[in-house]
Amino acid sequence: MSRILVVDDEKVIRSTLKEILEYEGHKVDEAEDGQKALDLVKENSYDAILCDIKMPKVDGMEFLGKMKQLEEDVPIIMISGHGSIETAVEATKQGAYAFLQKPPDLNQLLVTVRNACDKNSLVIETKVLKRKVTKTREIIGDSPGVKKIKDTIAKVAPTDARVLITGENGTGKELVARWIHEQSNRSNGPLVEVNCAAIPSELIESELFGHEKGSFTSAYKQKIGKFEQATSGTLFLDEIGDMSLSAQAKVLRALQENKITRVGGDKDFTVDVRVIAATNKDLIREIDYGNFRMDLYHRLSVILIHVPTLNERIDDIPLISEKFLIEICEDIGMSKKSFTPAALQELKKIKWTGNIRELRNVIERLVILSGAKITDTDVQMYANPAHSKIEESKKPTVYEMFDTLQDFKDFVEKKFIEEKLKKNGWNVARTAQEIDIQRSHLYNKIDRYGLSRADLD
């Protein structure tokens, strides 16, 4: 079932279109002008929009222009009783999906709406598939640490300099490596990834350099290693701090001479590879412990990029969360959801031990378990349920929270007024009558406690 927004200042036309489209199985929302429509678009996801051109406040053409900035992919069908070829051409130039004259032919209307909804579904599916195939996402954030990473990538990517990326698990080291490759002169070549921590030490050399048939018991055929697979491209050695010393020696030779020898072979092969390495370990300390070669460290660390933890860039959390929210809703085919400002502030308070990876998991959990608006209460309840239970048991009782009787009275009065205002849809006159005080007194209390409608929505 598709969700469609009908925008027209004439109620009769809105009602007629709604009745027709609902009969065809669509879910329909209405807006009497462009401004109301923009407000609805910010709250909901639509598969298509039917929009009149002549309207008060924000007219159809202005709405079309703003929509292309807000939700570029949503098909917008313009409808007008004052249509002309010039108007149709101008609407098409601004990105309208189609242009229909009033009164629209019923069959033409239904076919146009169906095609627009199909187009929107294909656009979303294409974006999801492209994201899954490329794996390369945008580096999101405006914090100093992220800006420094972006500036460094811009300078380093076009060169063949080796890069060592450091940072905790889940901070996005792989994403940085992908961006270096994508912006390099080798972007048309392969990006070959090797997780050094996931491969047993006895197999790492075969994985990196390949082996000849019969070189060991299970070597039934010749194997091409990752260095050769990455020729003309980039080799990403993730978690290189976990590589065995014997493999480190061979990697060092490959970096020095641009040559490798397959396990069990005696022939050298020239390789043309750019190497990017990443680790969550302190390699200087590993060198002191005798677990990592100093000469290899200096070969790898021509350029050093440190990826900060999420706790070191909390101002980026709202941007990252909003991006994840859009992606996850698209991936699982769910209508668009949104965060309340208080929810984003609550996310910033969390200590993120798993960094970006943990944040994405939390956003996915919130998308599945929360309503259309994700609130601060949802974040407290679902972000870390086990932690919430522990913290809940540590919280003081309501009587322990206040030192004086007046403080306690103010707290209770504020909560009481909040609930009554919420119940009455912020109708101050009705609320004052219900709680039996003068309207002017209620306004004074609203000012005193700093209440606003936005806080109660």
Image (spheres, grey):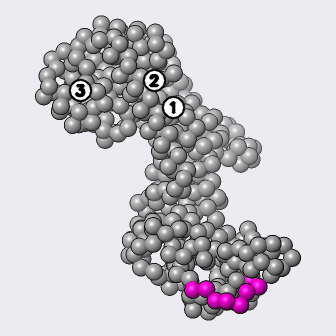
Query: Mark 3 and mark 1 in contact (Cβ < 8 Å)?
Result: no
**Does 197 appear above or below 125?**
below
In the rendered structure, which amino acid carries the disc numbered 1?
A: Ser
Where residue 3 is drawn, which disc sits there? 2
Q: CA distance from mark 1 to mark 3?
A: 24 Å
Dividing the picture into quarters, in which one does residue 381 lie? top right
Which numbered disc flags the more N-terminal residue, 1 or 3?
Answer: 3
Q: Residue at x 34, y 16 (%)?
A: 109
Vertical order, 283 against 153 (above or below): below
Q: Amino acid at mark 2?
A: Arg
Q: Is residue 264 magenta?
A: yes
The magenta region covers 263-270
- Which element is circle 1 on? loop
Nearer to me, 267 or 341:
267
- Residue identified by numbered label 3: 60
Residue 261, x across and y down, in percent: 67, 86
Q: Is residue 85 above or below residue 344?
A: above
Q: CB under 8 Å between callouts 1 and 2? A: yes
- Residue sitting nearer the eye, 314 or 91: 91
Rendered residue at 19%/15% (across/down): 81
Q: Main secondary structure of the magenta part?
A: loop
Q: Magenta stretch containing residue 331, yes or no?
A: no
In this rendered view, identify the residue nearer to me: 197 or 388. Answer: 197
Q: Give residue 335's mark.
A: 1
- Residue type for callout 3: Gly
Does residue 233 appear to the left or right of 211 in the view shown?
Answer: left
Mark 2, secondary structure of its residue? strand
Q: Residue at x 55, y 33 (%)?
A: 334
Residue 439 seen from this side: no
Q: Residues within 10 Å of mark 2 (few under 14, many from 20)?
A: some
Please state if 95 lies on the left or on the right of 290 as rendered.
left
Along the polypeptide, which appears first: circle 1 or circle 2?
2
